[in-house]
Image (cartoon, helix red, strand yellow):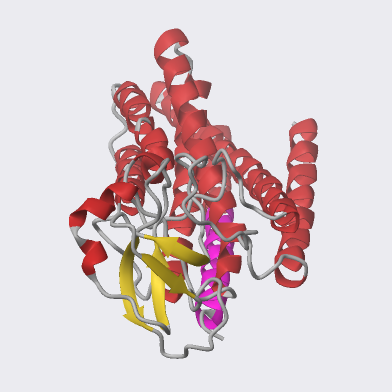
Amino acid sequence: MEKRKLIDFVLALLAVIFVIVTVLAALYYAPLEPLDVSTVLYHQDDYTGDDIRVKGVVQDLSGTEFALEDITSAVFIDVSYADSGDLDAGIVNGTTVYVLGRLEPDVGIAAREVEIADDPDEPAGWRSPYSAKIFYFHVPAAWTSFLAFGVVLVCSAAYLWKGGQKWDTWALSSAEVGLVFCSVAVISGALWAKAEWGYYWDWNDTKLFSTFVLWLIFIAYVAIRAGAVRHESIPRVAAIFGILGFAAVPISFLSSRIWTSLHPNVVATSQGHLSAEAGAVLMLGVVAFTLVYATLFSRRTAIERSVIEIEGIKEQLEDAE
Amino acid sequence: MIGVEQFYWAYLVIWAGIVLYVLYLTHRQNRIKREIDLLKEVMESGGK
């Protein structure tokens, strides 16, 4: 018992240290621009299928060139959008252009959204580079929620396969903690979107929608378990629900890579456009959030063990009566 | 600078969310501990 308390203490201490280091690094060390994307791309015949931000001269599918000197933001959309007729909008000097994403051989680049810039002298880059620092917490929170739901998957499968209350306890605890991190990722992402895109949410965006569905699935999981009735079939039903619910994790992760999405892909793309400093701070954040997860998971499982202990005592009292 | 407000809001939401959850867990753990102590007392007193 004492050993468990010691492990909990060390975990919590490490989590606090890493959280503080991450916060300081994100505020004072991390670059405002997490992406190293100064490369000017033009008709990249040898460039296939990777998302990238673009500055400089671009070309649409009809072959028309645009001198885009005032790009203040870039979003990544599939080149298939080029067929939607969005390219017909005339682009004049001094406009702010939101530029596409996937480049295919001989396809060139297509502009999707065009708006007149308020300030033509605004430097190129993210519309809101300061809010981009949310990235250093948003991504680790999302990663931690995926990890937590992965633990739900493994523990649920183990419960169905082997039985044993500890697997059920771990699955329940991990789902609840994962839900906290998923909520953090969704809300922080929405706040970033407001600054960068101008709105909090886009229901048509596959990344946002699939993550929202993932969030709802685990809200339902926790709600099932939080019910006052503790029927003996509930752990088994929850285990099946947890396994099926995990399917939403890869869908959420891959959605912006497979389907059209405004959500940037800066991690785990084949090119990996994160700068070294941004990558280091991001890794710090991932370690910090994973430690926070481990600490919260440990505390949550302790509570569940206590609940089981109470039930045992109550049964003893009933037997004594 | 655009986005500063959102950055601090996000900062607040992230850490306030985690801290609130820790407080909730602590509260729940303390309540359960009290319940266990009470039940043990009942057991020791012979179920009275």
Residue A205 position in % (x across, y down): 30, 54
Which residue is pictured at 59% across the width and 62% down the height? Answer: B19
Residue B22 part of the magenta-drawn span: yes
Q: How many marks?
A: 0
Q: Is residue A196 left or right of residue A3?
A: left
Q: Is residue B7 visible?
A: yes
Residue A28 position in % (x across, y down): 76, 72
Residue A165 part of the magenta-drawn span: no
Residue A111: quadrant of the picture: bottom left
Residue A278 position in % (x across, y down): 69, 57
Q: Is residue B38 visible?
A: no
Q: Is residue A15 above or below residue A239?
A: below
Residue A239: quadrant of the picture: top left
Q: Is residue A312 above or below residue A204?
A: above
The stretch in magenta equals B4-27
Camera-side residue: B4 or A110? A110
Camera-side residue: A71 or B19? A71
Q: Is residue A145 left or right of residue A116?
A: right
Q: For the N terminus of chain A, give its image quadrant.
A: top right
Q: Is residue A64 above or below residue B36?
A: below
- Provide the major secondary structure of the magenta segment: helix
Q: For the C terminus of chain A, give its image quadrant.
A: top left
Which residue is pictured at 49% across the width and 39% down the height? Answer: A146
Which residue is pictured at 61% across the width and 67% down the height? Answer: A133
